[in-house]
Amino acid sequence: MTAPSSAALPEPRAKEVETPRAAVPIPRLGPKTCPVSCTLLTFFLLAACSIHKTEQKGYCENIITKKHLDNLQDLIDSQMLMSCHVSFEFIDEQELGDPICFVKAAFPRLEDILDKMKFKTNSDNFNKTKDVQNMYKKIDENEVSCIDDQDEHERELSQACSKEFSMPPEKMLQKVKDFFQQVMDLLDKNVDFKRDCSKTYQKCSDALKKESPSLDRRRKEAQPKETQREVMSYVLVAILTIVAILLAVGGLLFYKHKSRTQERQLQHRGNVLEEPEGRPLNGVEEPLELRVQGEL
């Protein structure tokens, strides 16, 4: 047998080379990857903020109602006309001339005035007053206050705008009603109580400083007059005291003189009564004899 020729043997297969695969692009994170979802998220956030602001605005607009103002008017109408006055501290609105800054400064001080509104327990006026006081407290009970608080600087400056008031009870109640009416109008207009009122309050402080030198000048001018009045009053008191002493001494001397005179008269009468009975009495016996002779 002959061996098979090499030509009949199959040739070995060449090693296959794998072709490189194309790289799959990795998605990049960025605004282009989720335009729809981000837009929706932004929309929902804006909607939530808008709903919150709307709820806040509705709460503040409805917190003071016509019923509260009518209750205050009933309290005013039911007051007795009397001469007594109620004293309290409050912000002078005319001096400020700014309703927003006035409300911010006057709102905390209103609590003291409401505490002065006292009526018989469980009476009609008592219940109406309680309703107004509860309404006042609810203004600050919300998550975000309807009237923004003053900062420390504003609070310090607004002290100069405070004034001492003294008026009958019905006028005090009228001032309370006017304040709540003003607050209700401002809340309906959705005004911004976050506004800085430092410059407005500074006017009160500046006006107070200007008045201080003039007051000092008036006091200095009034001091000499007051000194003269004091000297004259001291002189007058001294003169009256001397006159009173002289009158007292004169009265005492007159009393002693009169007492001595009366003692002498009594002594003289006693001596006359002690004379003997047989001794004729001068000036008494002769007239008796003349009378007897005349009768005969």
Image (tube, rainbow, N blue to C red):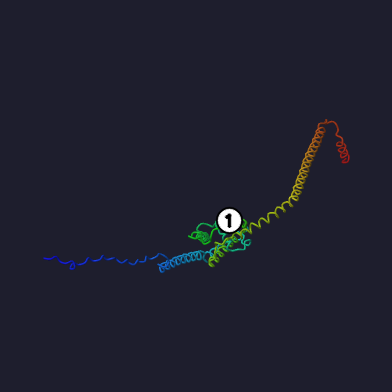
Q: Position of residue 246 (x, y in %)?
A: 79, 41
Relative placement, left or right, of 116 versus 243 is left
- Dividing the picture into quadrants, the one containing residue 182 is bottom right
Instruction: Choose between 67 and 226: the one closer to the eye.
Output: 226
Q: Quadrant of the N terminus?
A: bottom left
Instruction: Choose between 200 and 218: the one closer to the eye.
Output: 200
- Dividing the picture into quadrants, the one containing residue 277 is top right
Residue 84: in sight, yes or no? Answer: no
Instruction: Choose between 87 and 222: the one closer to the eye.
Output: 222
Relative placement, left or right, of 71 versus 34 is right
Q: Position of residue 175 (x, y in %)?
A: 59, 62
Task: Give the tally of numbered discs.
Answer: 1
Name the residue furthest bottom. 36
Image point (58%, 56%), residue name: 153
- Dividing the picture into quadrants, the one containing residue 199 is bottom right
Instruction: Choose between 96 and 33: the one closer to the eye.
Output: 33
Q: Which residue is mark 1?
A: 153
Instruction: Identify which amino acid the numbered label 1 is placed on.
Output: His
Relative placement, left or right, of 32 versus 7 is right
Residue 135 sits above or below residue 258 on the image:
below
Q: Position of residue 120 (x, y in %)?
A: 53, 57
